[in-house]
Structure formats: structure tokens, C-alpha cells
Image (spheres, coloured by chain):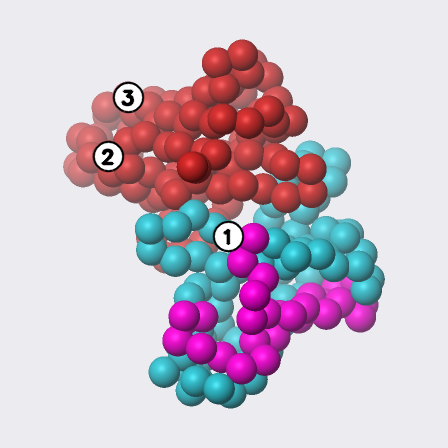
Chain colours: A cyan, B red
Amino acid sequence: DAGITQSPRHKVTETGTPVTLRCHQTENHRYMYWYRQDPGHGLRLIHYSYGVKDTDKGEVSDGYSVSRSKTEDFLLTLESATSSQTSVYFCAIREDVLDTQYFGPGTRLTVL
Amino acid sequence: KNEVEQSPQNLTAQEGEFITINCSYSVGISALHWLQQHPGGGIVSLFMLSSGKKKHGRLIATINIQEKHSSLHITASHPRDSAVYICALRDTDKLIFGTGTRLQVFP
């Protein structure tokens, strides 16, 4: 599993509140990703990072921001949560040699 | 227009049957991935293909670059193979995912 953890694993929050999800890896991989997964959609990329302080947007980045101040941590922030952001969020890392993505266990977020 | 199309969306099988899941795509790619998502939600990478065929245990993945098509085969299917199987295309630094094929294998 490439030592990927996500926290929290479950969260219920109210519309308009800020939320931060954390992804932590133990193996110093350069690339880290945040996805959301919703019924009827494939995994969709929110943001990704290709190094410390180097990030880029994915296809569904509106309403989300990210930060990566150290290699092992990639934070996803919802500045003001909305009900449309209710989803399961997965973090992943890319192992460069084999071009394999390893996924975290996911965070189930409910915005009421 | 979806860049990645998987078929079928849902598949049921009896234990022991040979399973085929298909993935068609419309763009040039450098690699294609197959992933498995278990009912509990965990996602694991099965294969990365850039050409030809790969085999791991009872799983076989093939890709035809010219026809823009890949297949995932499961031989001698078992109830523990029940999962969602996801095809994804490598697009530079990112993956583009299909919506998945839900497989249920009954004893």
C-alpha cells in the first residue's frame, strides 16, 4: 500500500464550514494526487502535486485548494464546504519506476 | 464525450466462468492501467500496459494500441473476484479513469 494514510476517514460537516483532508505517505514519492469518487462518475482528479510546493489543477478543482509543504504530506482544503462536495475522497501516489498508482483508504465526507 | 469507455457496466457470473471486461479509448496514450476496487472501497493497481499482454495469476490484461482497446480477463472466476474493475489512461502526469465494471461472481 506504499504507506499511504488519510485522515480523517469519515467526516460530517455543515455547509459553509472549512474542511481539510490530509494525505500522508512514508516513501518520499514525488507525485501525489487527490481524487473524488461519486456514483456514475469515474475517479476524477481534483489537484495533484509533482513536488514540494509544486501543484496543479485537475478537472474538478473549483472549490478546492491544496498545499504541499513537505514531501510526505498533501493537504486538500475545502474553503467553504457545499453539499455538492459530499463524496469519497482518495489520495494516491505514483511510483515512478513501475508507473503504478497506490491509493489511500479514502475519506468519506458528508456536507449537510 | 468520454475518452474511456468500459463495457459491460455490470457483469454477473457463476464461479468458474471466464470473464472478459473491455476498455475502449479515443485518444493516443502512453500506457493503460487496470485497477480493482473492492466492496470495502480500497483501490489496488492490477496492471500497467503499454503494449501486448500481461498475466498475474488468474488475471490477464491485453492491449491493442492500433485499435485503442484493452481487455481484462479473469480465468476460473471466484466469488472473491467480485469487485469494480477500472480502466485508466495515462495522460502525461495524470490518469483518466473509466466509470468501472461491477463484477459479481456467485458460488
Question: Mark 1 is on which residue type?
Answer: Arg
Q: B88 and B36: which one is in front? A: B88
Q: Are marks 1 and 3 on the same chain?
A: no
Q: Position of residue A19 (x, y in %)?
A: 55, 81
Q: Residue B11: give its label.
A: 2
Q: Position of residue B101 (x, y in %)?
A: 33, 38
Q: Position of residue A2 (x, y in %)?
A: 65, 52
State which region is magenta.
A59-86
According to the picture, the residue beneath numbered tag 1 turns out to be A44
- In space, the residues marked 1 and 3 are separated at their CA atoms by 30 Å
Question: Mark 3 is on which residue type?
Answer: Phe
The answer to whether mark 2 and mark 1 are in CB contact below 8 A is no
Q: Describe the element under mark 1 as helix, strand or loop.
A: strand
How crowded pointer 3 is (Cα within 10 Å; few <14, some 14-19, many 20+) is rated as: some
What residue is rendered at 67% in x and 68% in y?
Answer: A66
Report in which chain the residue with disc 2 lies: B
Q: Are marks 3 and 2 on the same chain?
A: yes
Q: Position of residue A35 (x, y in %)?
A: 54, 57
- In space, the residues marked 2 and 1 are separated at their CA atoms by 23 Å
Q: B66 and B16: which one is in front? A: B66
Can residue B80 be seen here? The reply is: no
In the picture as drawn, the residue positioned furthest to the front comes out as: B1
Report in which chain the residue with disc 3 lies: B
What residue is rendered at 43% in x and 48% in y?
Answer: A42
- B28 above or below A85? above
- B12 above or below A31? above
User: What is the quadrant of the C terminus of chain A in the image?
Assistant: bottom left
According to the picture, the residue beneath numbered tag 3 turns out to be B18
